[in-house]
Amino acid sequence: MERSRRDDIDAQDRIEVRASGPLEGTVAIGGAKNSVLKLMAACLLTEGTFVIRNVPDIEDVAVMGEVLRSMGVSVSRSDHVLTINRPESVTPEAPYALTEQLRASTAVLGPLLAGIGHARVALPGGDDFGPRPIDMHVAGLEAIGCQFEVSGGDVIATADNLVGNPVLLEYPSVGATENVMMAAVRAKGTTVIDNAAREPEIADLAGFLNHMGGQVAGAGTSTIVVEGVEELHPVEHTAVSDRIEAATFLAALGMAGGEITLVGARPDHMAMLCRKLGDMGVRTSADPDGIWAMCSGRLRSADVSTLPYPGLPTDCKPLLVAMLSVAEGVGIVTENLFSGRFRYVDELVRMGADIRTEGHHAVIRGVDRLSGAPVRASDIRAGAALVVAGLAADGVTLVSDPHHIDRGYEDFTGKLSALGADVRRERPGG
Ligand code: UD1
């Protein structure tokens, strides 16, 4: 007998969500995934023992740990602290089995080229966001003296002499800015990165490099100036707070109502999102502990357009689409960063949302209530958005493939339940 979609979902690890609210209490926001992964890569720059604090216990950090271990680096984790010991010699290769799991593993290119002068990194390929090339990483690194060839699916890069030079990025790519910054820190002379990405995680990485003895100025603005230095040393560092995790709990509050405090969240890194949420009916204000937030009554629709920082993060888009699907009125969402990234929309429609997509746009007519359904997480943020949607859905929402959520969220269901949400993780046989 043919198995139904429902049977398949029942047999798997999943998250079960019921209508919830109001939420109440405090939730601790962890260190930023998108910062920690790059800080880990930066440890390849020089020999010695690094300590990174405020590290979330998530799968992507575990995979990046494997990438470093495969190169001969020792990595140990305990209680949100990573200790990374980079020996004198490392194998500068990242295999496909790891890079295909973690696109951010391409962040090892810059530090390997600067630290060793050679790197072989398997190209990670596309993903649910559509093609995600690394041409800008390559162009930026070439501008400061690296040579590249592609063979057997790997990028093989060498740098005999890194030389400071102007680097004009075609687009403020986060990954390309970071790779060039990490290589330029050891180049001879001055590198000026123009049209640099301005994300807080870039400023965090620049701070890390400067503690190491690097000379990086302007991170957080679109012009970053890196003076190459001859020597770097290992450091201890505390990772910046995760603005996307914080945004996820604000979205949960929007769906369920209530009053919560996000301990450790950085309101200064979330200004555009907080303004948009304010338009939609979620009040936020800076609190000595982080961010205080309150929401009561029905959400209001708004138009949303994703842009590089300080614009609205593309990572928040699925959360905003989930919120708009129950808001009063019609909202138009425009994706400006990635070609795909609307896959979760079909799942929200299965929950009763009224959403039409056309290319980079989605038109969302808010409905009164969603209805619980079996749905599938297709990536980290899409998965989180489906759980959040379930908070405003009648009946039971079963989110399968929650391993995507584990890539970027530590104890997501535990943190939501502690705020009073009716959410639990069901594991096969457990
Ligand atoms: C990072 C984040 C991701 C976030 C994104 C945008 C990590 C691990 N991931 O991804 O969560 O959604 O920033 O804030 O930090 N592009 C090219 N060629 C390149 C590089 C990028 O065409 O060489 C394109 C990408 O396909 C995409 C856009 O530029 O359309 C943005 O990419 P980028 O800012 O580099 O994002 P990531 O670093 O991949």
Image: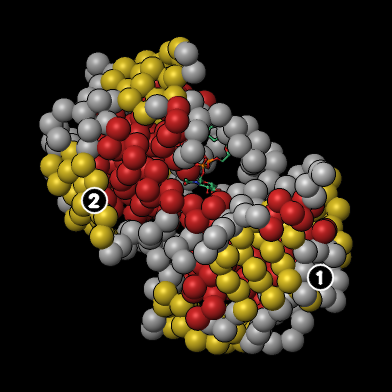
Three-letter amino acid code of the residue under disc 2: Ser
**Residue plotted at (25% across, 21% down):** 117
- Please name whichever residue, 211 or 297, is drawn nearer the observer in this view of the structure: 297
Tell me the residue at 45%/27% (across/down): 96
Q: Image height check: is 138 above or below 29?
A: above
Q: Is residue 365 above or below residue 296?
A: above
Foreground residue among 188 and 346 = 346
What residue is drawn where x is 48% and y is 60%?
409
Tell me if the residue at label 2 has its CB under 8 Å from ligand 1: no
How is the rendered protein coloured? secondary structure
Which element type, helix, strand or loop, lies under badge 1? Answer: strand
Residue denoted by label 2: 76
Which numbered marker is on residue 371? 1
Q: Is residue 15 above or below residue 177?
A: below
In the picture, measured across the screen, residue 185 lies left or right of residue 390, that is left
Q: Nearer the viewer, residue 66 or 235?
A: 66
Determine crowd level at label 2: few under 14, some 14-19, many 20+ residues with C-alpha closer than 10 A: few
